[in-house]
Amino acid sequence: MTPGAPGSHASPEEDVASPGGSSAGLPSLPAAAVRETVAALVRRHGAEHAEAIARGVRQVAERWWGEDGDAAAFAAFCERHYLADPAARDAAFARLESALEQVDGHLHEIRRDLRGPLDTDTGPLGPLDLLLGDVDLSANVEPDLYRTKVAFLALLNFPVHGLEERHRLGPGWSRAEWARSCLMDRFALRVPADVVKETTRALNAADVYVSAYDVPMDRVLAADGRRPFPPGLKLLSHWGLRDALRGYYAGGTEGLEKQRIIQRIMERIVRQEVPRAALADPALLWCPETNEVRAADGSAVRGDRSAREPDTRYAHLLGVFRAVRAVDPYAPTAPTFMRRRFDLGRQMQEKEVEALLVSFLEAPELDRLAAGIAGRLGRPLEPFDVWYTGFQPRAGLDEASLDRAAAERFPSARAFGERLSDVLERLGFAPDRSRWLAERIVVDPARGSGHASGAQRRGDRSHLRTRVPAGGMNFQGFNVAMHELGHNAEQVFSLEGIDHWALNGVPNTAFTEAFAFTFQERDLDVLELAGHGAETARRHAALHALWKTAEIAGVSLLDMRIWNWLYAHPDATPAATREAVLAAAREVWNRYFARRFGVGDADLLAIYSHIIHSALYLPDYAIGEIVAFQIASRLRGGSFGPEVERMTRLGRITPDAWMRAAVGGPISAKPILDAAREALEAGA
């Protein structure tokens, strides 16, 4: 479940009940019990405690189920455990914070071990690996905290703050007050263990599906029957396909042909038109343009062997939706997953995020940039040009040379790990801090595209996962490793360097993505392949930031539209969901991209695997791009390492408070748009 805080508090005069009435596992205390308990505590401790008592008692009542006891047991608990003495409250908070660090941290390590074969390339997956991957002992922590009434003691004595409260009160809080507020996020929702476990199972199943969706490119045919891709090449959807497409901009006419084939593959995937046998049978060839499956001798394959795969992609999306929707009855102040993702998780409202994204997509600078890119390419834009990379420093460098440079330095994931301190020094960290960071990061070969798994207690280590082919690390794997290294650096500093464990992390996922993007953009510096003069590079970086942020903003809006559609159609079939996703993708494309590309009804934005297995995660990428650009100015020159450390140690306060402390202003599209406009006017 997504942690967070209720946005409002009901008055003691209202009944505490579930949206559909009282039932086992939902609040059921009568209002009179709440009023009487508040009155008894105020008589005992004095009127100066009235407001805190009323709020604390109410917070307990909102989460008190029938299994916790009757009204008398509720009153007795509150009377016994309300801490009127500030010193007693401070001691209780310190003990709770310390205990939860150990519980969360060690259970995270167990979970990492159980999921090891799913996340890292340790050989073929066995049926036991899949079953163990569904084991989530942490799902029992919150129920146990309530069963033992630890959670109720916390709720009785410390407020659960809503987003509006944090914006209003946060500027005046001490670090300790911020820590208390953040720690109480975990008690905002009370969700039964079986509901949490089902969410874990659904997310794992979707993750396994997308992590195994490799396209055997060496068996892909062009329309004329040629096999344009090299032997042994497999590309994971969507990451591998997209990144290979980006690399082919340096490939001339042959590269353009490959880009068009990859676009067609992506379209077949999102439409679920890929013949099932095309991926599963190594003896068959597949032509994405005609969607024909052929035997090695060129003869057509018909019947069941040519039938398209079922709507598995969308069945997994529905599985995730239904699992997280089951949390809704236990979140009366955030009764949909979107509310929990935005208000509680991101600490940003959905309408606020949408307005931010639209401000990019409607910017006139995009019209000028699109025309400029078409001029650079010498042809009209095609839908796959949403991933144009011509303003990146590596533009003009062919994929083969980049692969060689990466493989020479890092022939394996282990080699990347052994040279991690050198990589960090090249990024701008002092030698001692580079060694300190490297000692706290473990590098593993990824089974999927790669990810970062941070520690959750001080003393553990963060894990960096990236995919490394048998022949050595290629540039794609290295680029992913640099992205994940940004996550790891943030994870280490914001845990090991934080003043309160409850503040560990950053305001939301977008902020850790911002550091990941910042590290990733310096990949050629590490490989000693950087080109362009400083001023040209700065202008190109602004144009690249505008183009890629617009692309991911479009995908993010699509993700948001999909989830709103799912809530409006909770009983949809996989086939209906497929058609709705495609329709939404075309609607976003037609509104924000078609006039710039001269092509309508493209559904390519739906290719992102995150849509299937990451449950409304994509807006974090778009917000992260915006934040990354804003913090980039603070990370230039010799200040990179110290500034990364300073910012990440601010902790998990609200996005607005974090940004003002980090860069002196709120999250805004303006810096990218201003820099891009300046670059366009300079003829970059």
Image: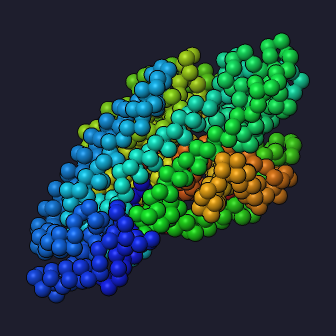
Q: Position of residue 172 (x, y in %)?
A: 31, 74
Does 344 appear above or below 528? below
Q: Is residue 176 visible?
A: no
Viewer-proximal residue, 75 or 488?
75
Q: Is residue 545 left or right of residue 265?
A: left
Does 654 appear above or below 478? below
Q: Which corner quadrant holds the N terminus?
A: bottom left
Colouring rule applied to residues: rainbow
Count of labels shown?
A: 0
Q: Position of residue 66 (x, y in %)?
A: 28, 65
Q: Is residue 221 left or right of residue 237?
A: right
**Point 82% across, 41% down: residue:** 377
**Point 59% across, 47% down: residue:** 317
- Looking at this view, name the residue that lies furthest to the right: 224
Viewer-proximal residue, 168 or 323?
323
**Point 16% across, 56% down: residue:** 95
Viewer-proximal residue, 367 or 326?
326
Question: In which image quadrant can residue 116 be found?
Answer: top left
**Point 49% across, 54% down: residue:** 324
Does 494 appear above or below 54? above
Does 169 appear above or below 24? below
Q: Position of residue 162 (x, y in %)?
A: 39, 71
Q: Position of residue 221 (x, y in %)?
A: 81, 24
Q: Is residue 614 left or right of residue 579?
A: left
Q: Is residue 12 visible?
A: yes
